[in-house]
């Protein structure tokens, strides 16, 4: 493996490399967003280039669409694909129930739509993402710009009613301006520390006018892969209840490392 990659980046690559085993010829594939998902896109592109793999991708963000297209993967709109065989995406946190916090890259809305429209969601992670209790990573909530400060107040009040301390909410920034999602919306990051009842919090947040979606992914993830820098990967499949520890075949002179300058 490229000596220039740091251990976390190697772990991300290993989990992405294992995840593309779920992709078969002719499949419609949801392409996640983030640095781990970018490795998956590069792995798939290599299979398209070298093995003639024929797939249709649906991207969860503009930047993933640009990466995939630039590497030769056919990308179509979800309206055209309609339904997907598998989605492979990263996560910011996951717990033992495979409930996720996503949206660190601001793509949670499209990621959730795409994951929901997939037969299977495979989540690719590194060891830093596994938590006992969700919430150390701030929970992203996508809100429409109109009256967003009022929406924030309503979120604060709803969290107090749930006995969750939600007073620490920040508007996500991109340099000095507010961060805008692909849909032109804003992201509020909820610094909750601990999230005991994800189902309830998710439900309550999504009832608030102005909230478009939140970053909790509940009962969506089928498989989580935790890659490690030594080339091993733990693969947990929630549907068949298996957990396997595998060694992933990694080619040190893989051309995808030069694609990213590694
Ligand atoms: O949810 C996401 C983007 O909205 C990402 O999947 C999540 O932030 C993980 O990113 P990375 O793989 O770079 O750690």
Image (cartoon, helix red, strand yellow):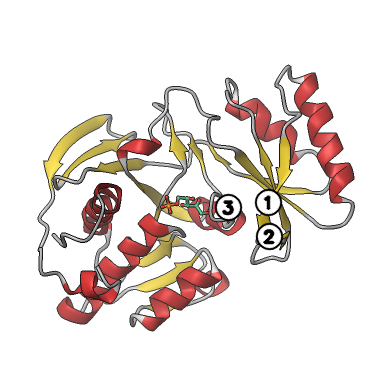
Residue 260: x and y in percent read 30, 71
What SS does tag 1 mark?
A: loop
Q: Residues within 10 Å of mark 3 (few under 14, many from 20)?
A: many
Q: Which label's residue is closer to the chain start, 3 or 2?
A: 3
Query: Is residue 70 something that shows in the picture?
Result: yes
- Near-viewer residue (119 or 248): 248
Residue pictured at 45% horizontal, 55% vertical = 118
Q: Mark 1 = which residue?
A: 172
Q: Mark 2 = which residue?
A: 179
Q: Residues within 10 Å of mark 2 (few under 14, many from 20)?
A: some
Q: CA distance from mark 1 to mark 2?
A: 6 Å
Q: Mark 3 = which residue?
A: 108
Q: Which label's residue is closer to the chain start, 3 or 1?
A: 3
Residue labelled 3 has its Cβ within 8 Å of some atom of ligand 1: yes
Residue 177, relative to residue 213: is it above or below?
below
Which callout, 3 or 2, points to the residue nearer the camera? 2
Residue 70: x and y in percent read 39, 82
**Picture quarter containing residue 164?**
top right
Residue pictured at 26% horizontal, 52% vertical = 6
Residue 190 badge: none
Marks 3,2: beta carbons within 8 A: no
Q: CA distance from mark 3 to mark 1?
A: 14 Å
Specify whether 256 is left or right of 90: left
Specify whether 73 is left or right of 185: left
What SS does tag 2 mark?
A: loop
Which callout, 3 or 1, points to the residue nearer the camera? 1
Residue pictured at 29% horizontal, 43% vertical = 225
- Near-viewer residue (15 or 207): 15
Quadrant where the N terminus sits is: bottom left
């Amino acid at each position: 493996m490229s000596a220039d990659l740091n251990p976390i980046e190697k772990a991300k690559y290993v989990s992405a490399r294992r995840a593309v085993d779920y992709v078969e010829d002719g499949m419609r594939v949801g392409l996640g967003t983030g640095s781990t998902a970018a490795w998956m896109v590069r792995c798939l592109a290599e299979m398209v280039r070298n093995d003639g793999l024929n797939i249709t991708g649906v991207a969860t963000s503009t930047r993933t669409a640009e990466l995939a297209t630039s590497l030769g993967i056919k990308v179509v709109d979800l309206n055209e694909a309609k339904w997907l065989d598998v989605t492979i995406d990263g996560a910011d946190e996951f717990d033992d129930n495979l409930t996720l916090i996503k949206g660190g890259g601001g793509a949670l809305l499209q990621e959730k739509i795409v994951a929901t429209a997939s037969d299977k969601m495979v989540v690719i992670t590194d060891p830093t993402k596994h938590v006992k209790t969700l919430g150390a990573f701030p929970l992203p909530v996508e809100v429409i710009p109109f009256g967003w400060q009022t929406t924030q107040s309503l979120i604060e009040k709803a969290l107090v009613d749930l006995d969750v301390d939600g007073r620490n909410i920040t508007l996500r920034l991109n340099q000095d301006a507010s961060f805008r999602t692909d849909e032109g919306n804003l992201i509020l990051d909820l610094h909750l520390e601990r999230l005991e009842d994800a189902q309830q919090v998710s439900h309550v947040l999504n009832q608030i006018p102005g909230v478009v979606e939140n970053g909790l992914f509940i009962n969506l993830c089928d498989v989580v892969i935790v890659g490690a820098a030594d080339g091993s990967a733990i693969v947990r499949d929630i549907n068949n209840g298996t957990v396997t520890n595998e060694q992933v075949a990694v080619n040190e002179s893989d051309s995808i490392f030069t694609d990213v300058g590694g």
